[in-house]
Image: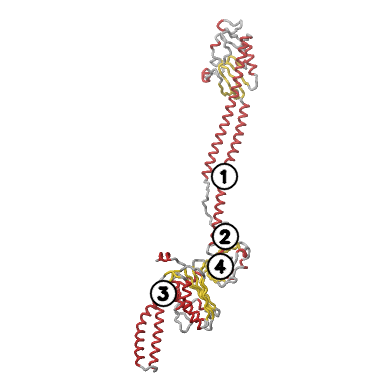
Amino acid sequence: MFIKKQSYRKSAGFYVQPTMIIGATLILLIVVVVLAANNLNREKRHMSQILTEKGSALIKSFEAATRTGMKSMHWEGQQVQQLLEEVAGQPDVLSLIVTDEHGKILAHSDPRQIGSSYLSPDAVASLTPSASENWRIVEEKGVRVFEVYRYFRPFTGTQVHMSANMSGTNAGCCQGHRDTWCFPQNYEKQKQIIFVGFDISPFEDARKEDIRNTVIVSSILLILGVTGFLTLFLAQGYRATKQQLQDTSAISDEVVANIPVGLIFFGRTDRVVLLNSAAEAITGLSFKDTRGKLFDSILPAELIEVVSSLKYKERILEHEMNCVFAGKSPAPLSVTAARIINDAGEFVGYVLLLIDLKEIKQLREDVKRKEKLAAIGSLAAGVAHEIRNPLSSIKGMASFYRDKFPDGSDDSDAADVMIKEVDRLNRVISELLEFARPSKMNLKPCDINTLLDHSVHLIRHDADLKNINVKLKTENNLPDVILDPDRFTQCLLNLYLNSIQAMETGGELTIRSRFVADQHIEINVEDTGAGISSKNLNHIFEPYFTTKSTGTGLGLAIIHKIIEAHEGKISVNSESGKGTVFSIQIPVTTVNEEQEKK
């Protein structure tokens, strides 16, 4: 399979649910509708107030003129009717009507309507007229009319001038004349109603225009509000997503930079896009120097073949190989390679994952060696126990027979040879038992420089006999270490003696001590002897491996075991004809830490 970018939904820091947007939109819609309704109602109230005030002014003017004309100028009904018609002729006034309390028309801006019924008694009763102005909207001949009405009271005095022809029960009314306003004698006790009708079409046209404008403005406000909400949410989501991408990018950069696996990425054009620090350490390449270069110009032939094969394969998993990089020795690597395909199915590039197997192989070798040593130790312990008792008997019998023969005789010399061989076997068995049995340590704080000085003093005589110059170079103020001084001195002496034996014609033996940054004290034993061949270098710590004709092959194995018992490490670096360097690292452990371990 190709490596693809996984498509999944991430939970952003700010996630806007659709219901939130719908809810915000509904709230905004309600607010806009309420504001629009209030605006329309305000326009309606404003229109009714203006027309009511205008109607009230007309009614009061008509009442005042009627009162003045009848009292001062002795107007008759005809003059009052003329005044009514003139008043009704003002702009926007459709009608001016006076009715009695039963709805019969007493005066009308259209004289032809006088005497007819304008409202039924029930309709008049439903109007609930009063001394103050009221209003209503009616439809007359297909035209909507705004009517202002109230009780009509033109007379306030007790005397009303009547025409000379007004007499009898019908005084105050001109009989037979539809164009004459008839007043009964008890007029002031009658409840007459005056109606002023206005044409509201201009107001309604203006109101329709206002409604249209309100709808347009409200729609624009609603659209702007919804857009604002969406923009706000999207902006917040964008900021949250951007922040998440920045955090993810920072995490990815840190992971890629610090992952203990070498990672090399090549883009679509086969050029280097990324090379992390682990890959730099493994390959010896620098990202600064290799960025933008073709892969076949920087990689060894083994990896070039791997990347080239990806054009025909989907991936290569954990392929172990030895790669030789410029200026470096062959490195065992586990290589994983794959093509990268994005969600759109487009090719993005190649990725190489390199794992350095040196430590893993070393661990494998250590495990094998320990398993081998454990098996040999168990076998050696049993064999040594079975052999030691018969050897004691053989040595006793050889000593007995040596005493029976004269000194210097062949028989006596043969007995001496037997005794020496038995002693040699006993020494081998003692070393074997020491190697097989668990190491018992007498640990205590020690000054490593003091131990080195003491151990060097013990071998100076042997070194002088072979014309070997011994140098001790110690670093001052080293911290104390917890170790067994006797066993550790035994290790040092074995290393010194091995170095002296390797310098048959003289040379130089250098012992150094220093403190390293990872809380270890390092001791180096360096000689200028014959060195160790590369084929033997990986086997020198194995038991019974030796290149000496008289060696047992257990010396370095015992040293390795003692150093491990101190939780330390020993390594060797050698080249034939150029000498050998043994490096011992002992951790710096305080007394309190050692007591806690116990």
- How crowded pointer 1 is (Cα within 10 Å; few <14, some 14-19, many 20+) is rated as few
Q: With respect to residue 100, does 165 lie above or below? A: above
Q: Which mark is residue 232?
A: 1
Look at the numbered discs 3 and 4 and tell me whether their residues touch, using CB distance below 8 Å: no
Query: Where, by quadrant of the figure, is residue 557 drawn?
Result: bottom left
Q: Is 482 on the left or on the right of 54, as rendered?
A: left
Looking at the picture, tell me which residue is in the foreground, 340 or 595: 595
Residue that label 4 marks: 282
Looking at the picture, tell me which residue is in the foreground, 306 or 105: 306
Residue that label 2 marks: 341
Q: Position of residue 101 (x, y in %)?
A: 54, 15
Residue that label 3 marks: 374
Q: Position of residue 185 (x, y in %)?
A: 56, 8
The residue located at (58%, 56%) in the rendering is 344
Query: Where, by quadrant of the figure, is residue 391 drawn?
Result: bottom left
Look at the numbered discs 4 and 1 and tell me whether their residues touch, using CB distance below 8 Å: no
- Amino acid type at circle 4 is Ile
